[in-house]
Amino acid sequence: MQHLHSSDSRIMPWKKGGGSTTEIAMEPKGSGLADPFLWRVSSAKIEASGPFSSFPGYSRSLVLLEGAGLLLDIVGKHGTARQRLKNIRQPVVFSGDDTVTATLIQGPCVDFGVISDPSRVRAVVQVLVLGAGATALTLTSSYRSQCALPLTTFAELEPLTPTTLLFAPRGRVRVEPLAVELGAMDSLFSDGSSGAFGQGARLELHASAPDTPLVVVQFWPVATPQHERAPAQGNAHG
């Protein structure tokens, strides 16, 4: 488990202006956008309308954190669509292969973005709006709802453990029983090896103010039935 502080993030102004991106975490750690990365989590400050960068072969999810939002004109292999990034509780998902043009609805805004390799992981993004009291969060312990496979194949699957990230865009959020307090733009990250932060873990979230958002991201390994996996290397018998 890692507490990622806002001071650890990397801020990258856009080459053509119009905004900047704050990189929160990336897997593998230390990789760049030119490398074949597994996933990337970031927040962007958008100050001007314009095109999005393309990420061929990746899946993208966006959540609005601040501002009136964006109109997204998306051109992909299935045609043209317009989506509104306007509600903090409703992520917008699209392909990194798509051509996307963003139009500010009314002034600058801030979003939270996830880019992931869909051939290796499935990213599940949800936003909680915490009240003044404690909010219970049970991390998903079943992989069935995360896999597009027939039910008959689940007996052949090895248990999957997701990587989980909690992001507090405005802070402060105390996470119990881990005794961790997240400040603004802090994250709590676990690859699932921590028992207190693993499958089925029950956390209590305490916000310092009502209507405090918390973004929960889980990266699930793409499940492959055992009979479809590559055979282990070694001496053959027979």
Image (cartoon, rainbow, N blue to C red):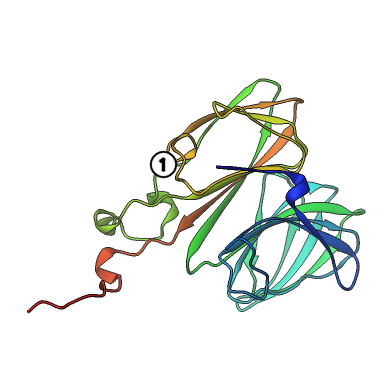
Residue at the image point whose x is 67% and y is 76% from the top: 34
Residue 112 at x, y percent in the picture:
72, 53
* Front residue of 84 and 107: 107
Q: Amino acid at mark 1?
A: Ser
* Front residue of 49 and 57: 57
138 left or right of 132 in image = left
What kind of element bears circle 1? loop
Residue at the image point whose x is 52% and y is 66% from the top: 118
How many numbered circles does the render carry? 1
Quarter of image, res 181: top right
Quarter of image, res 176: top right
Can residue 64 be seen in the rendering of this structure?
no
Question: Is 238 located above or below residue 184 in the figure?
Answer: below
Quarter of the figure that contains the C terminus: bottom left
Instruction: Decide: few, some or many residues near mark 1? Use Cα within 10 Å; few <14, some 14-19, many ≥20.
Output: some
* Front residue of 76 and 23: 23
- Residue tagged 1: 141
Question: Is 200 located above or below residue 25 in the figure?
Answer: above
* Front residue of 80 and 184: 184
Residue 174 at x, y percent in the picture:
66, 28
Quarter of image, res 82: bottom right
- Farthest residue, direction left: 238
Can residue 197 be seen in the rendering of this structure?
yes
Quarter of the figure that contains the N terminus: top right
Residue 134 at x, y percent in the picture:
62, 22
Residue 140 at x, y percent in the picture:
46, 42
Residue at the image point whose x is 30% and y is 74% from the top: 230
